[in-house]
Image (spheres, grey):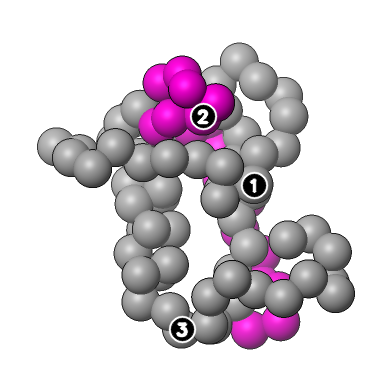
Amino acid sequence: MNNPTDTPDYAPLDDAEYRRQARLLRALHCAYPVMHKGKLQFIQAVHASLAGGRIDMDIFLTGNPAIIDSKEITLPEKQV
């Protein structure tokens, strides 16, 4: 979603997307593993920015210098 002409997949105040982004932040804070390309990994850093009334999140995974769009991250259903 880095292209300003892209349309968001969710409304600015979409409750489900808000909860998903909150779970990403919790995974960072509590060191919960997340799934990326079939492998469990840990979030090293999150970059959030305003993008036309919504929040775009870029993720940095431990040991990987690439920027990952938050939509490429799968969160396990159960997090303690």
Cα separation between marks 3 and 2? 26 Å
| Residue 69 image label | 1
Residue furthest to the top in view is: 63
Q: Position of residue 48 (x, y in %)?
A: 61, 58
Q: Are marks 3 and 2 in contact (CB under 8 Å)?
A: no
Return the disc, 1 or 2, that comes first in the chain's sequence. Answer: 2
| Residue 15 in sight in this render | yes
The residue nearer to you, when weighing 30 against 77, is 77
Residue, disc 3 = 13
Q: Quadrant of the N terminus?
A: bottom right
> As drawn, is 80 to the left or to the right of 48?
left
Looking at the picture, which amino acid does disc 2 mark? Answer: His
Q: Under tag 2, what secondary structure? A: strand
| Residue 36 image label | 2
Residue at x 71%, y 37% (from the top left corner): 67
Specify whether residue 22 is painted magenta: no
Cα separation between marks 1 and 3? 19 Å
Q: Position of residue 35 (x, y in %)?
A: 43, 30
Q: Position of residue 70 (x, y in %)?
A: 56, 48
Residue at x 54%, y 26% (from the top left corner): 37
Pointer 1 local density, CA inside 10 Å: few below 14, some 14–19, many at least 20: some
Looking at the picture, which amino acid does disc 3 mark? Answer: Leu
The residue nearer to you, when weighing 51 against 76, is 76
Q: Which numbered disc, 3 or 2, marks the residue closer to the eye?
A: 2
Q: Under tag 3, what secondary structure? A: loop
Residue 70 versus residue 67 in the image, above or below: below
Q: Are marks 1 and 3 in contact (CB under 8 Å)?
A: no
- Determine the image quadrant of residue 62: top right
